[in-house]
Amino acid sequence: MARHSFIAGTGAYLPECIVTNDELARSVDTNDAWIHDRTGIRQRHIAGPRETCAHMGAAAARAALCQAGAEPGEVDAVILATSTPDQAFPATALRVQAELGIANGFGFDLAAACSGFIYGLSVADGMIRTGQVRSALVIGSEVYSRIMDWHDRTTCVLFGDGAGAVFLRATEEPDRGVLSTHLHAQGGLGDILYVDGAVGRHDRPGTLVMNGREVFRHAVTRLVETVEEALAANRLTHDAVDWLVPHQANRRIIDAVARKLGMNAERVVVTVDRHANTSAASIPLALAEAVGDGRIRRGDLVLMEALGGGLTWGSALARF
Ligand code: UT7
C-alpha cells in the first residue's frame, strides 16, 4: 500500500468559563427552550483573556502529541485552521510551534471557516502521501466569542470557543489511516455567512453575520452529497461506517444527515449540546472526546463532514 497518513493522537482544550443558555438570556432576548429546541445547544465555553487562539491550539496539540507518544522534535508541519487568529501574522500555527518547542519544519494557518479541519486534514494527508513531510499536527482553534455581536440573538447563542488537534504520522499499513478527503467551495454563496471586518483592523475587527435559514438549507444537501461521495470513492456502504463525527453546528443538521445515512444515534458523536459551534475546532474536539472515552477504537471507520462560511464543505474518511 502506498504511503498515507494515520491519526496517531488526538487532543482537546476547552476554556474554563462555561456560559449556559440561561446565563445568556440575562443579557439578550432569548431563552433556553428556544436555543435547545432549534439547535440542541445547552451551554458553550468562552475564552478568558489568556486563552488565546495560540494558547488553546498549543494545549490541544500538546495533548495530541502526548496521546501519540510523540516528541515535539518529530513534528514536520503545523497546520492550524482558524477564522479567529490572534494576529494577521505571524501565523498562529507558528506561535504554537514556538510554544511547543518545535524547532524544525514549517507551519501555516488555513482559513476555511467551519470546514477548516477537513481542509487541514486533506492538505496534511496530501503532503504525507507525496513524501514532503512524515508527520503533521492539524489543529482547529477558535475564539468566536471575539467576533460575536453580543446583541444579535440570532448568532451569539450559537457559537463557543475551544481547540482540537490531531497528530498525523506516515504509514504504509493498509488497514489504517486517512482513506480519502473531498473538498468543495462555492464563493458565490459568500454573503450568507461572513465576518464584516478583518483581524488587524482596529476600526473594524468584524462580527459574524449569518442568514441561518439559508445556511441550514445548503448544509443538509451538501453534507449528504459529500458523505455519499466519500463512501462511493471507497466503494463502501453506509453500514461500514462505525462513527459519524460531524461538524457541530446544529443538532437538527446532524440528525438529518445521520438519518439519510441510516446511522442510528448511538453511532454519532455529538458535542454541540456542551460546546456549541466551535467552527474549525468542532470535529477535532469531538474526535478527542470519543477517542478519550474509548468509543472510537483502533480499527473503527470514522466519517467526518463539515460545512461553513465560504461556502466551504467537505468530508474525510479515516480508519483508526
Ligand atoms: O457552522 C457554520 C454553519 N452554520 C450553520 O449550519 C447554522 C445553520 N442554521 C441554523 O442552525 C438555524 O437556521 C438557526 C439555529 C440559526 C436558526 O433556526 P431557525 O429554525 O432557522 O430559526 P429562524 O432563523 O427561522 O428564526 C425563527 C424565529 C424568528 O422569529 P420570527 O421571525 O419567526 O418571529 C427569530 O427572530 O426565532 C427567532 N429567533 C430567536 N428567538 C429566541 C432567532 N434567534 C432567536 C433566539 N432566541 N436566540
Image (cartoon, rainbow, N blue to C red):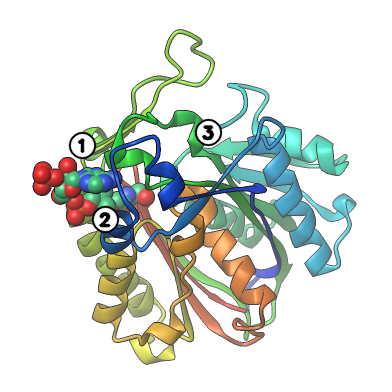
Instruction: Indicate which disc residue 188 carries.
Output: 1
The three-letter amino acid code for the residue at tag 3 is Thr
Residue position for label 3: 84
Residue 138 seen anywhere in this rendered image of the structure: yes
SS for tag 2?
helix
Q: Amino acid at mark 2?
A: Trp
Query: In the rendered structure, are the residues bearing label 3 and label 2 in contact, judged by CB atoms less than 8 Å apart?
Result: no
Give me the disc on residue 94.
Answer: none
Q: Are marks 1 and 2 in contact (CB under 8 Å)?
A: no
Residue at x 72%, y 39% (from the top left corner): 55
First in sequence: mark 1 vs mark 2 = 2
Disc 2 residue: CB within 8 Å of ligand 1: yes
Q: In the rendering, at what x and y percent does residue 297 appear?
A: 64, 85
Residue beneath the point at 38% across and 86% down: 236
Q: Which residue occupies the foreground of this view, 29 or 319?
A: 29
What amino acid does circle 1 point to? Gly
Above or below, 232 against 63 in this view is: below
Label 1, label 2: how many angstroms apart (C-alpha)? Answer: 31 Å
Q: What mark, if any, has residue 34 been given in the picture? A: 2
